[in-house]
């Protein structure tokens, strides 16, 4: 089979607790000549433009992001890069840390994604951020190349996102509210910003300071010492204290993942201080937190490795590592509208040897109940793992079971997305349409999804042969 290549321009936009920035990447798609279906994969990634680092603008009171100030900053980077919206074919906007908890976070990320290009995913979520920052920093590649186990931590303004990587495969993720911008103050040490986790940390050291009061250098140092110690406990699997449990935003890393010979690495804004690349203070906790983390890492005997990216790790991950491409044996009903965003995924368990229409219906019904989705009123993606053997009769029985479980969706014309990890998408989609009259179906193959994922699907590429898909965790 002939090797075919195609380039795509991707954007990553990171709206963080402290800073917001943008990166453009060039992605090269290439088909696998040894694949039976000739599936396209992302073969090359290169950064073509790194935008400036801007302070995330907030409205008075710090409860909302000022989108009217933020959008011109980001669009200015498009102009500097010489990129128009029509040039951007894929990418992701990710809203991270404390910014993801601002009152208007969901509206902001949806606006930026809709204005960012043709297919830019809207996303947030601590586990997803841990994954893409690990990729963007170069931690996954370091672990793969060196065959090692690496605990990577992206510490920004509001959170620390952690990924455990074993020989290039991420095996666990977690997030804790430890960051450099949980408190902010002016040149006179008057507090201008206290996030909820910052208030908790002040109480931990016996302080009841509020915005407008002066904070002492000793109090800043104590807050940073407590944060650093708590984060180090989480990174090393030390039995958790009450404070760690209160600051965690996800389940902790399983203890077994942190046993044995490990390396550690950091990215995010605080990593600039940990690795001695920055020494200035910006009216927050970053400098002192980084200093304590580096000292404690040395005291605990952690083996730190340096990676290619620090402060821009998340935005590079959003730009370069969020895209997947479906296999070419896909099916789309006439008029199926794309892009489609934020579709929840559930995964019915179908055993081929037990195939019957009644069995498929029961399993799909159960999968929908698990995620509390009414398939008759809202889009849903069903992800299957090798559910049906090839052969017309097998596929017809499978399709009949789907139609019985999804009758309300089919009658209402609600978009239905079917995802297969094998190359049966076109066959199932055709039979489902022809035999049951389902008229708003998209069936994609050779993509593996997990229950609890969300997906965005863009318009077909490569002359309609494949579809771009962003798989994510969406939590506001």
Image: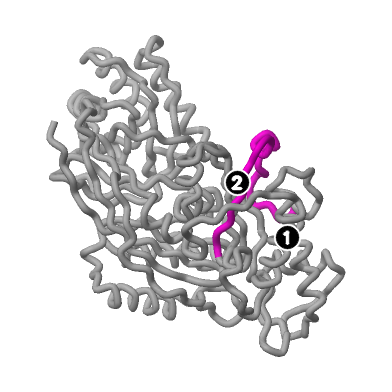
Q: What residue sits 39% from the left and 20% below the top?
A: 360
Residue 338 shows up from this direction: no
Q: Is residue 438 above or below residue 93?
A: above
Q: On the picture, is 33 further left or further right than 251?
A: left
- What residue is disc 1 on? 228
Q: Residue furthest top?
A: 353
Q: What residue sits 71% from the left and 46% below the top?
A: 236
Q: Is residue 410 above or below residue 94?
A: above
Foreground of the two, 211 or 273? 273
Dot 2 falls on a residue whose secondary structure is: strand
Q: What residue sits 75% from the left and 69% below the top?
A: 199
Segment colored magenta: 245-268
Dot 1 falls on a residue whose secondary structure is: helix
Q: Position of residue 290 (x, y in %)?
A: 66, 66
Instruction: State which quadrant residue 418 falls in.
Output: top left
Q: Residue furthest right?
A: 206
Quarter occupied by the N terminus: top left
- What residue is disc 2 on? 151
The mark that comes first in sequence, 2 or 1, is 2
Is residue 267 highlighted in magenta? yes
Q: Residue furthest bottom?
A: 188
- Badge 2 local density, few (<14 within 10 Å), some, or many (20+)? many
């Amino acid at each position: 089979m002939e090797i075919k290549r195609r380039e795509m321009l991707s954007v990553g936009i990171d709206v963080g607790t402290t800073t917001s920035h943008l990166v453009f990447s060039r992605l090269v798609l290439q088909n696998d000549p040894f694949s039976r279906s000739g599936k396209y994969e992302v073969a090359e990634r290169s950064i073509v433009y790194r935008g400036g680092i801007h302070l995330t603008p907030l409205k008075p009171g710090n409860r909302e992001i000022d989108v009217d100030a933020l959008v011109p900053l980001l669009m200015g980077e498009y102009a500097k890069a010489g990129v128009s919206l029509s040039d951007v074919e894929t990418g992701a906007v990710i809203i991270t840390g404390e910014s993801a908890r601002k009152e208007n976070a969901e509206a902001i990320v949806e606006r930026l994604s809709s204005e960012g290009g043709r297919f830019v995913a809207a996303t947030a979520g601590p586990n997803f951020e841990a994954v893409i920052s690990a990729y963007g920093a170069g931690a996954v590649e370091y672990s793969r190349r060196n065959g090692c186990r690496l605990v990577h931590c992206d510490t920004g303004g509001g959170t620390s996102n952690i990924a455990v990587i074993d020989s290039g495969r991420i095996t666990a993720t977690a997030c804790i509210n430890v960051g450099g911008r949980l408190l902010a103050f002016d040149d006179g040490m008057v507090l201008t910003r206290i996030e909820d986790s910052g208030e908790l940390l002040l109480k931990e050291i016996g302080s009841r300071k509020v915005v407008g009061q002066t904070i002492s250098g000793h109090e800043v140092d104590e807050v940073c010492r407590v944060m650093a110690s708590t984060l180090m406990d989480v990174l090393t699997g030390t039995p958790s204290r009450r404070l760690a449990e209160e600051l965690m935003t996800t389940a902790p890393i399983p203890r077994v993942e942190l046993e044995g010979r490990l390396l550690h690495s950091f990215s995010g804004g605080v990593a600039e201080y940990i690795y001695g690349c920055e020494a200035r203070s910006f009216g927050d906790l970053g400098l002192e937190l980084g200093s304590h983390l580096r000292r404690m890492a040395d005291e605990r005997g952690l083996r730190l490795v340096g990676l290619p990216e620090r402060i821009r790790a998340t935005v590079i991950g959003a730009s370069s590592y969020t895209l997947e491409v479906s296999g070419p044996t896909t099916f789309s009903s006439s008029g199926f509208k794309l892009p489609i965003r934020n579709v929840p995924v559930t995964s019915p368990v179908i055993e081929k040897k037990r195939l019957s229409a009644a069995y498929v219906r029961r399993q799909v019904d159960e999968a929908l109940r698990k995620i509390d989705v009414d398939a008759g009123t809202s889009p849903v993606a069903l992800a299957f793992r090798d559910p049906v053997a090839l052969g017309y009769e097998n596929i017809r029985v499978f399709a009949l079971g789907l139609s019985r479980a999804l009758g309300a969706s089919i009658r209402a014309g609600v978009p239905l997305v079917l995802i297969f990890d094998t190359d049966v998408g076109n066959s199932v989609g055709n039979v489902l349409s022809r035999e049951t009259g389902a008229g708003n179906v998209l069936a994609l193959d050779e993509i593996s999804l997990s229950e609890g994922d969300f997906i965005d699907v863009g318009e077909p590429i490569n002359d309609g042969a494949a579809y771009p898909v962003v798989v994510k965790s969406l939590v506001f």
